[in-house]
Image (cartoon, rainbow, N blue to C red):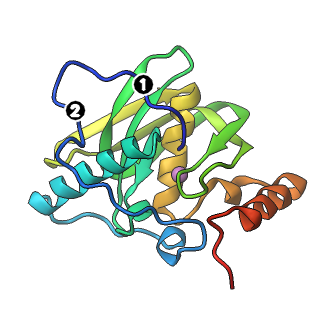
Amino acid sequence: MERTIAAMRNRPIPGSSGLIRAMSLLGDPVLHGICEPVTDFGPSLARLVEDMYATMYAAEGVGLAANQIGVPLRVFVYDCPDDEDVRHLGHLVNPRLVEADGITVRGPEGCLSLPGLEAGTPRFDRAVVEGLTVDGEPVRVTGTGFFARCLQHECDHLEGAVYTDRLTGLRRRKALRAARRAPWARTG
Ligand code: NI
């Protein structure tokens, strides 16, 4: 998800020890494949999550999935406001979207893998995701509004889907045409 970052908190900033990694863009096979579950909760996973935070903040995003930095594992990070401007900051390993309900809202949605573009994309107004922390502790995250959109968007990434896959008809054709004409577009 793409949007300006919120204010920093007075505590160690996630990603402060991470490396900014290259972003996988639309058309990169790793972005369009299903990610594998994490089985190793060792230091390499902690480094991956730190790198993901660092890369998300550098790109001024509100969410980032591991395959967006070329790692096909089921992990995402987020630092995202909801519609009441409450900040949600965290990460999920092996997340499962266990509930997605309420009204469907079509709202502007962007993605760091399609920089500079956005399209009105339908999403449920409420989402619940269960998964694990980097230490293997179970967590359950509930989101509404824009944060629910973010949770659904990041879960989609782990299935190899991007928001344009949620579009239909003219909206989809326009979004894909804009992506083809974007300065970062892959040719051939
Ligand atoms: Ni995205």
- Ligand 1 has an atom within 8 Å of the beta carbon of the residue at disc 1: no
Looking at the figure, which quarter contains the C terminus? Answer: bottom right
Instruction: List the residue tagged with mark 1.
Output: 6
Q: Is 165 left or right of 12, judged from the image as shown?
A: right
User: Are dots 1 and 2 in contact, CB under 8 Å?
Assistant: no
Picture coordinates of residue 88, whole percent (x, y): 38, 27
Residue 73 in which image quadrant:
bottom left
- Residue at the image position 62 percent from the left and 45 percent from the top: 110
- Ligand 1 has an atom within 8 Å of the beta carbon of the residue at disc 2: no
Residue 146 bears which disc, if any? none
- Residue at the image position 13 percent from the left and 47 percent from the top: 135
Extreme-left residue of the structure: 43
Extreme-front residue of the structure: 183
Q: Residues within 10 Å of mark 2 (few under 14, many from 20)?
A: few
Q: Nearer the viewer, residue 112 or 126?
A: 112
Residue at disc 1, secondary structure: loop
Q: Nearer the viewer, residue 167 or 4?
A: 4
Give the amino acid type for the residue marked by disc 2 in the picture. Answer: Ile
Mark 1 or mark 2, earlier in chain: 1
Instruction: List the residue tagged with mark 2.
Output: 13
Picture coordinates of residue 129, whole percent (x, y): 41, 41
